[in-house]
Every structure is written in C-alpha cells, then in structure tokens.
Image (tube, grey):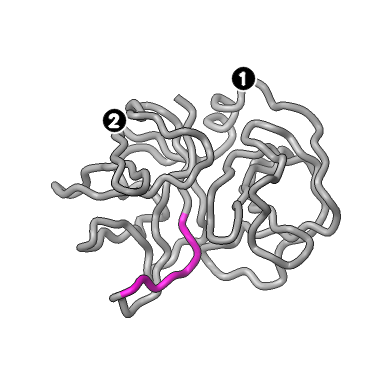
Amino acid sequence: MEVVITGKTKMQGGLCIGGLRLSDWSAIRLLPSDGSRSWPTDSPMKVGEVWNVEGAPNAVLTPPHTEDFRLTVAPSKVRDYGASLKNDIVANVAVAQGNFAALYQGHLLPILSGSICVRRPNVPSFSTQFWIATWDINLRLNGKAYYVVSWQDKTYKMPYVGVEQPVTVIPAGSLIRVSLARWFTPPSHTEEACYLQLSGWWL
C-alpha cells in the first residue's frame, strides 16, 4: 500500500509519522512493527515522500486515534510525491475551513489554561485533520514553540510539534495539519484529555 507522508511530529520517546493512503486518501498513522507507538528520531521518512507499507489496523483502536496502523515489515520509499501535494489534498480530503468550530466534529473545548482539547464523552472519530484558517496564525516562543490564535474573543495556543523550523506567520488561506495528542492528564488536572497541536503547513 502506498502512503504519502503528511505529518512527522515530535512526541515523548521519538516521532509520530502519519500520512494519507493514496488509494482513497484516508488518514493513517504508521506504527512500528516492534509494538511501540513512536519511531526513532533518525527515521528517514519525510513529509512529501511516498512510502510502501504493509500491515494492518492496530488491534485496539481508542478514539480519537482511529488511524493507527501497525506495520509488519519495514517500509520502503517509492518516490517523492511532488509539488501538487497541497492541491491534491484539498481536492481529495474533507478539509475544514473557518474557525475552530469547524474542526473535529465540533468537539473542541477551550480551557482556562489557554489550551484547546477534547474530553470524554465528546470525542471525535479521528485525530488528524487538515484545516484552512481564515486568519493569520502567529508564532510565539516561550520555552517551546506555540502558534497563537483567537477564538470566542480569547487567545489560545497550539503547541507546534513538527520537525521543520517554525515560521513566524502562517498566512490565512494556508493548508494546515492539526492533530490531537494521546490521552493525557497534565499536572494539577484531574481529567484526561487530548490536546490540540499543530504539526505542519503548506503555505
């Protein structure tokens, strides 16, 4: 099966690598054959490359992370996709447009800490999504890289987890890939949540 890589993001212990099946443009998250959730930081897979993969959907799929696909053999690079990737994603994938209400089946929840997340029982059926924002999204550096957005007259932040250097401004109209982190209970919180993060863009 051929997959175009559309996300390569930092996570605890390594990298998360996701893409789209070229057969039907459905989302997929590639999991190593050794049973782990992450790839080593020197993984050769890059955004914009087409790789051949073999495996099956993970035996246990916990929403919203329904894209998990466990490989059974090592993946192999086929080719570079080419410059048309952005346009082909827009043409073949249901891309959200507008503000955060358009994302994740309307289940995103702004919280007092300034983050955005989903919590049970309002959980979407997927964890990765493409989005075209109608305003500029600005970078803020505060120990880590965040992209700052306004929603419901308040300012919220999305951690940037991609491996490419962050840009100062993601202009309105750019194609953005967002994802929901794995279920997590931060210190001083009492409830698990999946937090919204920004993983990449096509300007």
* Residue in the image at 16% along x and 49% along y: 154
Residue identifier under label 2:
136
Which residue sits at x=59%, y=39%?
6
| Residue projecting furthest to the bottom | 190
Residue 72 spot, x, y in % from top left: 83, 59
Q: Quadrant of the C terminus?
A: top left
Residue position marked by numbered label 1 in the rendering:
83
Quadrant location of the N terminus in the rendered image: top right
Reply yes or no: does residue 186 show up in magenta: yes
**In this view of the protein, which residue sits in the foreground, 169 or 165?**
165
Amino acid type at image mark 2: Asp
Q: SS class of the residue under badge 2?
A: loop
Disc 2: CA contacts within 10 A as few (<14), some (14-19) or many (>=20): some
Question: Residue at point 57% right, 42% down?
Answer: 7
Foreground: 105 or 148? 148
Residue 143 placed where, x, y %?
33, 49
Residue 77 falls left or right of residue 178: right
Q: Which residues are magenta?
A: 180-187
Residue 186 visible in the shown view: yes
Report x, y in % for residue 126. Answer: 52, 57
What is the x, y in percent for residue 20? 65, 42
Q: In the figure, 76 relative to 30: above or below?
A: above
Which circle's residue, 1 or 2, is located before the other in the chain?
A: 1
